[in-house]
Amino acid sequence: MRLTKFKETIVSEDDLVAAIYSGKLTDFPSLLLDDTDLVKQFNNAVTENAEHINKLELYKESTETQEEFDKRNQKQWFMPNDYCPNLVEFLYGQCTTDEQTDRVSSELELFIQHGMFDLLFYLKYLVDTMRENKIVWGVGRGSSVASYVLYLIGVHKIDSLKYNLDINEFLK
């Protein structure tokens, strides 16, 4: 195995065979291979014998920037289309003081300015899914604890208003 500049894993023929024999091939949303013959052989075998398995695409070195790569992949996240359509309403519904409402308003504006607003929907879905499945995650670390909106969604357990943390520490 080796990594691309975006830390994607390119698998070797041995890695591919190991995934097939272990029965874990369908666990991968996609596999990257840079061997043209191997990709053709695999796709022919899938067509003939196992149409439930995704076909492979030949890996080609990307010319896109990290930002373009991130945006493209964020559009491919799995999340039900109608999940939490009223996220803004949910966030304001958690507020009980004017200070909290003002903070949510200013943070939402910043999330929009930084092109990160859609990420909030996914984070809400991720946190709710982890709660439903009794998956434990950390109380918070790094600059994300400066976001009151992330606190309300449940990404972390640090009330940034209580500790007077500046949102600009998160969205630098």
Image (cartoon, rainbow, N blue to C red):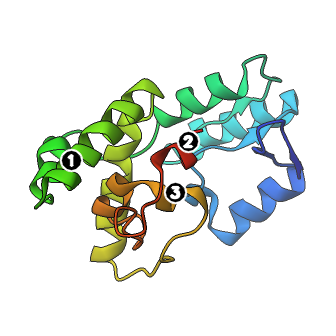
Distance of mark 2 from mark 1, alpha carbons? 26 Å
Which amino acid, by three-letter code, is at mark 2?
Asn
Near mark 3 (Cα within 10 A), the count class, few <14, some 14-19 or many ≥20, is: some
- Identify the disc placed on residue 144: 3
Give above or below for 40 relative to 126: above
Q: Residue furthest top?
A: 63
The image quadrant that residue 39 belongs to is top right
Residue type, numbered disc 1: Tyr
Would residue 134 appear left or right of 35 to someone viewing this image? left
Which residue is labeled 1 in the image? 83
Specify the quadrant of the image occupied by residue 6: top right
Of helix, strand and loop, which one carries label 1?
Answer: loop
The residue wearing badge 2 is: 54
Question: Which corner quadrant of the image does residue 156 belong to?
Answer: bottom left
Q: Residue at x 18, y 42 (%)?
A: 88
Q: Is residue 43 left or right of residue 74?
A: right
